[in-house]
Amino acid sequence: MRVLTGGVSPSSSSFEFVPLSVVSFGSTVIAEGCDAATSISWIHAWTVANGIITQVREYSNTSLTVTRIGNVVAGRRSAEIAPPSHCSSVWESQFSGRAGKPVPGLVLAI
């Protein structure tokens, strides 16, 4: 059985993570890749604080849209600025369609 973190059982073939895209939004870093040979697309979302990864989210064969909610000014939520009426997308996965099959979609709010 193959797991997203790269571990495999002895009977499985190997899987390499090669990022095709890496972007950051404040403390969130998104890496995305696709392995057409195994029909697997993947997305890693890391939260980084003081140079240390504090949280990891992994998505496999999933289309991901990242949205920013609320207003942040100088690292703090501003009470003086009215929140937007809707959350706009700041990033969308590009490689989930390369897996060759339909995939579910998720929204990551940051």
Image (spheres, rainbow, N blue to C red):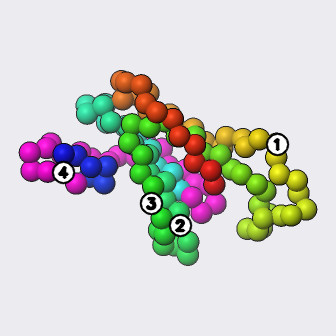
Q: In which quadrant is the C terminus drawn?
A: bottom right
In the displayed structure, 7 sits above or below 54; it is above
Classify residue 8 as left or right of residue 53: left
Q: Report crowding for label 2: few under 14, some 14 to 19, many 20 or more residues within 10 A (C-alpha).
A: some
Choose the circle earlier in sequence order: 2 or 4.
Answer: 4
In the displayed structure, 94 sits above or below 16; it is above
Which residue type does callout 1 highlight?
A: Ser
Question: Real-space Cα distance between discs 4 and 3?
Answer: 19 Å
- In the rendered image, residue 22, in percent from the top left (x then y), is placed at 50, 49
Q: Nearer the viewer, mark 2 or mark 4?
A: 4
Q: Is residue 19 magenta-colored?
A: yes
- Secondary element under disc 1, as helix, strand or loop, is loop
Q: Main secondary structure of the magenta part?
A: loop
Q: Residue furthest left?
A: 11
Q: Which mark is residue 60?
A: none
- The residue carrying mark 4 is 8
- The residue carrying mark 1 is 85
Which residue type does callout 4 highlight?
A: Val
